[in-house]
Amino acid sequence: MSQTCQHCGATSEDDARVMCPSCGRRMRPRDAAPSDAVRSEAVPEPSPPPTQPPAAPPPYGIPPYGVPPMPPPPWAGGPMPYGVSPYGSPNVRPAVFFDRTVTQRSARLTVAFRLVLALPHFVLLAFYTVGAAVAVIAAWFAALFIARVPVGLYDFLGRYFAYYARVTGYTAMLTDRWPTLSNDDPYPIVLRLPGPGRLNRAAVFFRYILAIPASIVLSVVGVGAEILAVVTWFVVLIAGRMPAPLFDAYASTIRYYMRAQVYVNLLTSTYPAGLFGDPDDGMDAVGAAAASEGPRTPVVESGARRLIVVFIVVGALGNIAPTVAGVVSGSSRINAAIASSELSDAYHALDFGSFTACNTPATSFTCYVETARQDAQVVASFQDSIGRITFPADVHDEVVKLNAAVQEFRNDFVALAGAKDRNELRTILATLDLQGDSHAFDSAVSELGQRLDSES
């Protein structure tokens, strides 16, 4: 008797057959109920996924074209490599984060010898700066041609300025921790740069001219901060901590200095600003309100702003003082040159009479007296000329000495001119040292002239 396969529907004449001759599956016995059989369905084979056409290549300047792989950030605690995207954001303002531990307690011993402890870093920084200067020149030419700083140069300069910020902050007593040379180790002072990005070629070409206003501001506030650093040193040494307003004033000054430096050296296209504070002051490296511990941006409030104004005033005076001194010194040199010329003219205008012509016995007495009177007038005229000359204050002693010598020389001639007869004339000649007074007069004029020449 035949039976039918429940799987494929094939019919078999052998009712005792177990396996279907067509599909090879087990058949249900002829006398078994349909509900007792194991139901199985044929599982369709999965169809292969449809093939996608190759995507068109992206335009140049979008990954993977035109953007080299980015290195890790050259500072500890920074965000993504060079700012907010792997391609750099040159318009992001550079930031500097400071740990505020020294506002609570500072080590007096390291403060006392701070400059001595920082001396090795000054030496190392001097050599480092030579390499950075070469890198800046190469970066300038590269930016002119490709409108961006190559990643390798950017990374080298970023590490240099990060180290520079650490040394500067340590010298300014904003941290007690000795600066680390490696940028991979955590440090209380962190520099964050925007990363290499597209730059304006015209701005690159005229970068140093564009930086003149910022350089003027930096020179004024920087000189003021350096002058008052001595006062700050005593305050920290005595108090055992850095007062918070003073800390924020110096931190903001250093931040502005680093922003100006990285702008001049092509690491950002954002013009330096924020000397009196930023809108995000007091934030940590990820832009959140920082806790009491950990680096964060300076908190430039009213006290810190007043101190920055003091820096500016003192710095302006410090910059003006050498200029005023130079003007005064230049004016003094000019006055000395004029006085030297007038003294020389007055001296060469002297026209003394000669006593050698008074050898005739009949006229010798009258000749001596008349010649002495004329010479007294010549010396008096020279004395008046000296009185009209404006001498520099530095030659006051030489002028006094000359006036004394001139007066003594004039008195000699006045005494000779006052003789009543030959005997009195002989007596006066015997008591006077006319030759010695003449030599003293010449020496005083020569000494004053040499001193004026050295001053001019």
Image (spheres, rainbow, N blue to C red):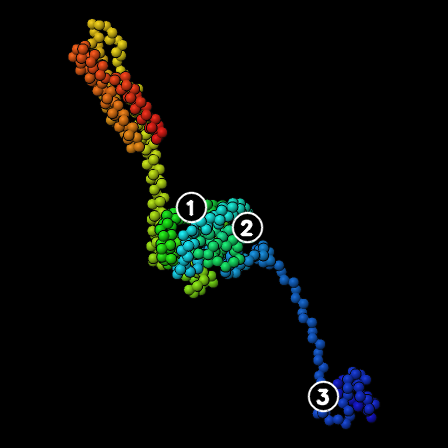
On screen, residue 362 above or below 307: above
| Residue 8 sits in quarter | bottom right
Between 205 and 164, the one nearer to me in the picture: 164
Instruction: Tell us which disc is closer to us: 2 or 3.
Output: 2
Q: Who comes first in sequence, dot 3 or dot 1?
A: 3
| Residue 68 sits in quarter | bottom right
Q: Residue furthest left?
A: 420
Q: Amino acid at mark 3?
A: Val
Residue 73 shown left or right of residue 410 in the figure: right
Q: Decide: marks 2, 3 in contact (CB < 8 A)?
A: no
| Residue drawn 71% across the image and 80% down it | 43
Q: Secondary structure at mark 2?
A: helix
| Residue drawn 79% across the image and 85% down it | 20
What is the quadrant of the C terminus in the image? top left
Write down the residue under mark 2. Answer: 153
Write down the residue under mark 3. Answer: 38
What is the quadrant of the N terminus in the image? bottom right
* Relative image position of residue 242 (x, y in whole percent): 38, 57
Q: Secondary structure at mark 3?
A: loop
Crowding around mark 3 (Cα neighbors within 10 Å: few <14, some 14 to 19, many 20+) is few
Residue 127 shown left or right of residue 351 in the figure: right
* Relative image position of residue 158 (x, y in whole percent): 51, 53
Q: How far is mark 2 from mark 1, CA to CA?
A: 24 Å
Write down the residue under mark 1. Answer: 212
Crowding around mark 2 (Cα neighbors within 10 Å: few <14, some 14 to 19, many 20+) is some
Between 99 and 119, the one nearer to me in the picture: 119
* Relative image position of residue 172 (x, y in whole percent): 41, 52
On screen, residue 377 above or below 86: above
Q: Amino acid at mark 2?
A: Leu
Between 12 and 220, the one nearer to me in the picture: 220
Between 288 and 326, the one nearer to me in the picture: 326
Instruction: Tell us which disc is closer to us: 3 or 1.
Output: 1
